[in-house]
Amino acid sequence: MAATSTPQTQSKISLAGKVIAITGANRGIGLGIADCCLSNDAQAVYSIDVGDTGEEWEAVSKRYPGKLHALKADVTREETVTQAVDSIIKDAGGLHGMVVNAGRTKHKPALDFTTEEIEQLWNINLYGSFYCARVAARAFIKQNVKGSVVFTASMASYRPNKRVPSAPYGASKAGVRNMTHTLAMEWAQYGIWVNSVSPGLVKTAMTYWVPQQPDWEQQLKYYGGIPRLAE
C-alpha cells in the first residue's frame, strides 16, 4: 500500500514583482496591510494618504528598505488619486493592486448627526472608495493588467453596534460592500478582481477609546468568537 502523503500547506501568498497601492496606509489597518504585503515579497507598496507619516510608518519602512513609499492625495478628489497612481506607474513601472482602505468613523445617535458630519463620512468612505477603485481600474485596463481591487468594508455593513451606533457609517460601508459586487460584475470582462473584507474592531488610533470603557471586560464576554480587539 502506498504511503499516505501529507498535504502541503502554503503559509505565504507570493506577491513577488507586484506593486500595490493602499489608501490610508500611513497608520492603522492600512499600514498593517502594507506590512503584510511587503512580508509576502511585494516589489513595492505605496501609501496614498492625505496626512503625514509617523513613527509607526517609519518603523515598517526601515524593515523593508526602499520598498514602502508615501504619496499625498485626497480620496474625495479623484484627480489627486489619478495623479498619485500615474506617479506610481512612472516610478515603479506598473500597478497590480489597489487596497481601498482610507476611511473615517464617527459614532453617535442618528438624531444627533449634523448634515456636515454625514457628508464627511460618505465623501470619504463611499465616494472616495468609488473614485479610488475607478482610478485603479482605468490604470489596469490601460496597462492590460489583470489587477485586483480590495475594499475595506466593515462588520457595521452587516449589523448595528448597540454600544457605539453610527447609522451613517454603517450605511457608507454597506454601500462599499454592494459596490464590490457590482464592480466585480462590471470589470470581470477586463480580468479585474474586486473583493472586500469586513473587519470588526481593530486596535488602531481611531479605536483607542474602546478598551477604556469601564465595562469593557464585561462587553468582551458578548463580543464574538475571539474576545479581544484585532491587532
Image: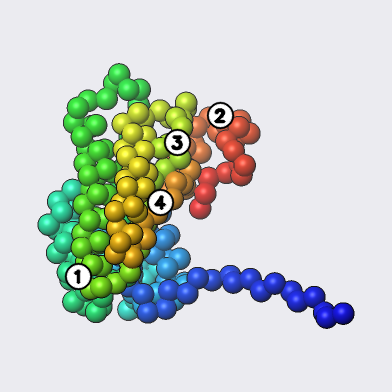
Q: Distance between the residues labelled 3 and 2?
A: 25 Å
Q: Which amino acid does label 2 sit on?
A: Asp
Residue 54 shows up from this direction: no
Q: Distance between the residues labelled 4 and 1?
A: 23 Å
Residue 182 shows up from this direction: yes
Mark closer to the chain start, 4 or 3? 3
Residue 33: x %, y % from top left: 41, 61
Q: How crowded is mark 1: few (under 14 residues within 10 Å), some or many (20 or more)?
A: few
Q: How is the image coloured?
A: rainbow
Residue 212: x %, y % from top left: 49, 36
> Can you identify the residue that label 4 sits on?
196
Taking 78 as reference, is 180 left or right? right
Quarter occupied by residue 7:
bottom right
Q: Which amino acid does label 1 sit on?
A: Lys
Mark closer to the chain start, 3 or 2? 3
Mark closer to the chain start, 4 or 1? 1
> Can you identify the residue that label 2 sits on?
215
* Outermost front residue: 189
> Can you identify the residue that label 1 sits on?
142
Is label 3 in contact with label 2 (beta carbons under 8 Å)? Answer: no
Mark closer to the chain start, 1 or 3? 1
* Outermost right residue: 1
Q: Is mark 3 on a helix, strand or loop?
A: loop
